[in-house]
Amino acid sequence: MNRDKKQLRRHFRSLRTGQLDLFDSIRACVEAELSSRRCIDDKNRYLAIYWPLPGEIDLRFLNHQTAVALPVADGSGTMTFREWGKTSLEPDGCSIPAPSQGPDLLASEISLLLVPALAMDRSGIRLGYGGGYYDRLRAQQPWRSVPALGVLPQICLTTTPLPREPWDVPFNGWITEQGTGLTDLKSAS
């Protein structure tokens, strides 16, 4: 693992831990963004969220408002999304609760991808935990067209560029307690 990234992860995890009192405000901004995009009303497509790990903003309440998909990781670097709500959840290959049955959803079935971030820079480069699951998924051509926003506290949004790998696909923007910000990418709509 890149030593700089390891130090950055430790730094931003510590910053994020100090922001737990802002998580309700971040959730409210997520709801406002979804309303403005009409994601909650889109019955033909899914909102892709995540099962929160400790310290991540919990968006599971959205399962009661719209059709939601959760990631299913195989533990070897591959991730797909499945509908959440009709099947039971079981630990996936990374021991994270995930839909145990059902077809893998196509990128065209996803209206918006919300992804947890330890940090993001203003060009849309995300710092995660280092597994590369979202990088590999978003590197696939059909998934590049799915709008993707990082979810994080404002203090973890940095003006300093984060380390960028050749395989990184920039995100379209982010949602913090201050609202939604977009990069210069044109596919953010």
Image (cartoon, rainbow, N blue to C red):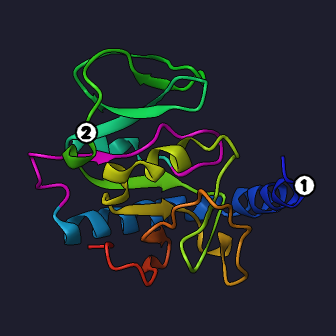
Coordinates of residue 6 in the picture (x, y in percent):
84, 53
Residue at 50% across / 62% down in the picture?
Answer: 150
> 4 above or below 103?
below
Query: Magenta includes 84?
Result: no
Work out whether 2 lies above or below 122. above
Q: Position of residue 167 (x, y in %)?
A: 59, 56
Q: What numbered label is drawn on residue 3?
A: 1
Q: Position of residue 119 (x, y in %)?
A: 66, 64
Give the vertical position of 38 relative to 109 (above or below): below
Q: Is residue 187 above or below residue 6?
A: below
CA–CA distance in space, label 1 to label 2: 35 Å
Image quadrant assignment for residue 72: top left
In this picture, residue 179 sits left or right of residue 154? left
Query: Left or right: 40 with respect to 135?
Result: left
At x 58%, y 60%, the residue is 168
Q: Residues within 10 Å of mark 2 (few under 14, many from 20)?
A: few
Q: Which residues are magenta?
A: 39-57
What element does badge 2 sit on?
Answer: loop
**Which of 102 and 55 lies nearest the eye of the viewer?**
102
SS at badge 1: helix
Most common SS among magenta residues? loop
Tally of numbered discs: 2
Magenta span has 50? yes
- Disc 1 marks a residue whose amino acid type is Arg
Question: Mark 1 or mark 2, which has the lower sequence index?
Answer: 1
Residue at image location 26% in from the left, 73% down from the top: 189
Residue lying at 21% horizontally and 48% vertically, measured from the top left: 108
Q: Quadrant of residue 31?
A: bottom left
The x and y percentages for residue 181 are 44, 79
Amino acid at circle 2: Leu
Q: Which residue is mark 2?
A: 106
